[in-house]
Image: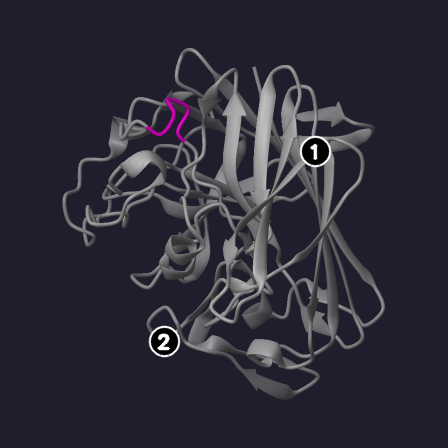
Amino acid sequence: MEKKLFGYMPNGCAVYSYTMKNGKMEAEIVTLGGIIRRLEVNGTDVVMGFDTVEAMLTDTSNQGALIGRYGNRIKDSHFFIDGKEYKLYANNGKNHLHGGKYGYNRKLWTAEAKGDNVLVLKYFSPDLEENYPGNLDVTVTYTLYEDALGIHYEAVSDKDTFVNLTNHAYFNLNGGDGSNILDHVLQINADTYTAVDSALIPVGREAVAGTMFDFRTPKKIGTDLHGTKVSDPDFGYDHNFNLTGAVKETYDGKELNVCAVLTNGKLTMTTLTDQMGVQFYSANFLEDPRVQFKGGVALNRRMALCLETQFEPDAPTRGENLLKAGDKYETVTVYRFA
């Protein structure tokens, strides 16, 4: 495994990159935010990213970063545990998104290489950081397999709390050439999706059948995207899909749900997970041509997509998926390529 100095945080702390390689794939992970900066498959870099620490810190789209303490939205930026209210930072209108003002994507993680193709990242989140209760010890392990990148999330708290960890990689199987993903073909094994209001807060589950959300049979992502304004119902995807769990595969000894299959006709990425939800985001708001990705590529809408494995959004509001003190939060996601 190759370790390099990548840059420095504003306080002078060093940021390192770790590169894992095998005959087919190459993955570069940065200790700032645990960011997947580069993921090459047969020479094609399939994730968006940045060249500098400064660009990563000013990024508002969470490119390739680990997300926590709680991924996705929490309505009205608060939740209750045992009758006690915890008020969170409102960074998405009046709602809370992806951990708050300074989520895990902004944190410097410690890293330890375990052999050539396993990188273990750790972060200690103190009690009431972003006003979440509990001292939380977080471990995320990246493993580069022969044909895949695996992410193993673990966390333990000393108080009851809510945890929902994910990765916010933006994929384009054509590589970072500035092309969009509307011709990518996607299949998602979900019979229902989580419908949302105008603030993208869940309002209940609805069947995908007969709607633009039906990806049970593979279709081009751009098939049903005709809206030109955010208010248009067919403007873009930023929705949770509730996996059926009916299609499973065993990978590295773990039985995982076949979540989604994405292809551009040359390269195929299969997302495997033990979670029952995935947020499909079609990069509807990447619209600033002044921002540049690796190699000077301008940031533009729908030039990539995210498949964020997760709990269903806004679960804390419903009191769901509470992590009890001393219990272990653990989940696995694998992005496999062929």
Image position of 172 (left or right of 248): left
- Neighbour tally class for label 1: few under 14, some 14-19, many 20 plus, Cα within 10 Å: some
Find residue 161 and report its horizontal and vertical position in percent.
69, 72
Q: According to the image, label 1 marks what residue?
A: 1
> Element type at marker 2?
loop
Most prominent secondary structure in the magenta stretch?
loop
Residue located at (34% from left, 43% from top): 237
Q: According to the image, label 2 marks what residue?
A: 94
Range covered by the magenta-colored residues: 172-176
Front position in the image: 308 or 151: 151
As drawn, the residue found furthest toward the bottom would be: 84
Identify which amino acid the numbered label 1 is placed on.
Met
Where's the N terminus, which quadrant? top right
Q: How far apart are marks 2 and 1 (CA)?
A: 43 Å
The answer to whether residue 122 is magenta is: no
Find residue 165 and report its horizontal and vertical position in percent.
62, 55
Between discs 2 and 1, the one toward the N terminus:
1
As drawn, the residue found furthest toward the left would be: 228
Residue 61 seen by the camera: no
Front position in the image: 12 or 293: 12
